[in-house]
Every structure is written in C-alpha cells, then in structure tokens.
Image: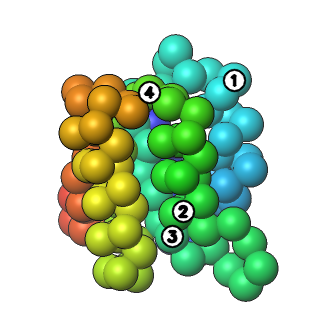
Amino acid sequence: MKLFLDDLRNVPEGWELVNTVPELEEVFLKHKDQVTHISLDNSLGWNTPQGKTFVDDFIEHQWDVENIWLHSSDFMAVDYMKEQLDIARRGGVISENIKVQIKNYPEDYK
C-alpha cells in the first residue's frame, strides 16, 4: 500500500490519497504491515497539521516503513523533514533501512 499525503494534487495511479495528517496516521496505523511507501506534502492548509508534524510523530513513535518520499514544493519543509529523518536514522531512533527520497511531482510518480 502506498499512501500519498496531499490536499491539492491529484493522487498518482497506484497510491491511496489521504488529505490530512490525522487521516494519514489513522490509515498508516491501521495498515502499517501493508504500507510500503508514504509520500508527504508539507503545506496542507491554514491551521492544519503539516507534513512536518507527521515526520515528528513518526520519529517520536519509532514507526517503520520501507520508503518515505517528500514531494512538497516547500523546499524548506522538505529540507527539515529529510534532515530530521536522516538524523533519526543515523542515531538509531528509527530504522536505518528506511529509504528517504525527495521526489518531483508528477514526474517521479509515473
């Protein structure tokens, strides 16, 4: 299962769209043994938890998934999310086997 967090973009073929961080966390926890990819946007609207919030929760709870992709156009948030995940992997807080990649939407989703 591939989960795609975004509030505006069309969901790529083969991915399941989730629009909010709470929805993503609910679906991920319910199906975490089946989830292979999570792709994160950061900017999800005003007064709404952002993709960075999910990254912080992911690290805090030491969740695991094979791949985390970052597709936000907010380059500062992408840098933050990637850096936090990389630090947590190197520090042994989360699995060092998690592949964290920055992806261009929609080119990298074909």
Q: Nearer the viewer, mark 4 or mark 1?
A: 4
User: Looking at the picture, which amino acid does disc 3 mark?
Assistant: Asn
User: Looking at the picture, which amino acid does disc 1 mark?
Assistant: Lys
- Earlier residue among tags 1 and 2: 1
- Earlier residue among tags 3 and 4: 3
- Earlier residue among tags 3 and 1: 1
Alpha carbon distance from label 4 to label 2? 16 Å
Q: Eyeballing the image, is 17 above or below 78?
A: above
Q: Eyeballing the image, is 82 above or below 37?
A: below
Q: Residue at the spot x=64%, y=45% of the render?
A: 24
Spot occupied by residue 100 in the image (x, y as percentages of width and height): 26, 47
Check contact, mark 3 vs mark 2: CB within 8 A: yes
Judge the density around disc 3: few (<14), some (14-19), many (≥20) Cα neighbours within 10 Å: many
Residue 11 vs residue 109: left or right? right
Circle 3 is placed at which residue position? 42
User: Looking at the picture, which amino acid does disc 2 mark?
Assistant: Gly
Spot occupied by residue 14 in the image (x, y as percentages of width and height): 42, 39
- Earlier residue among tags 4 and 1: 1
Circle 1 is placed at which residue position? 30
Alpha carbon distance from label 1 to label 2? 19 Å
Alpha carbon distance from label 4 to label 1? 13 Å
Q: Looking at the picture, tell me which residue is in the foreground, 51 or 83.
A: 83
Spot occupied by residue 41 in the image (x, y as percentages of width and height): 48, 66
User: Looking at the picture, which amino acid does disc 4 mark?
Assistant: Asp
Label 1: which secondary element: helix
Check contact, mark 3 vs mark 1: CB within 8 A: no
Circle 4 is placed at which residue position? 64
Q: Nearer the viewer, mark 1 or mark 2?
A: 2
Q: Residue at the spot x=22%, y=39% of the render?
A: 90
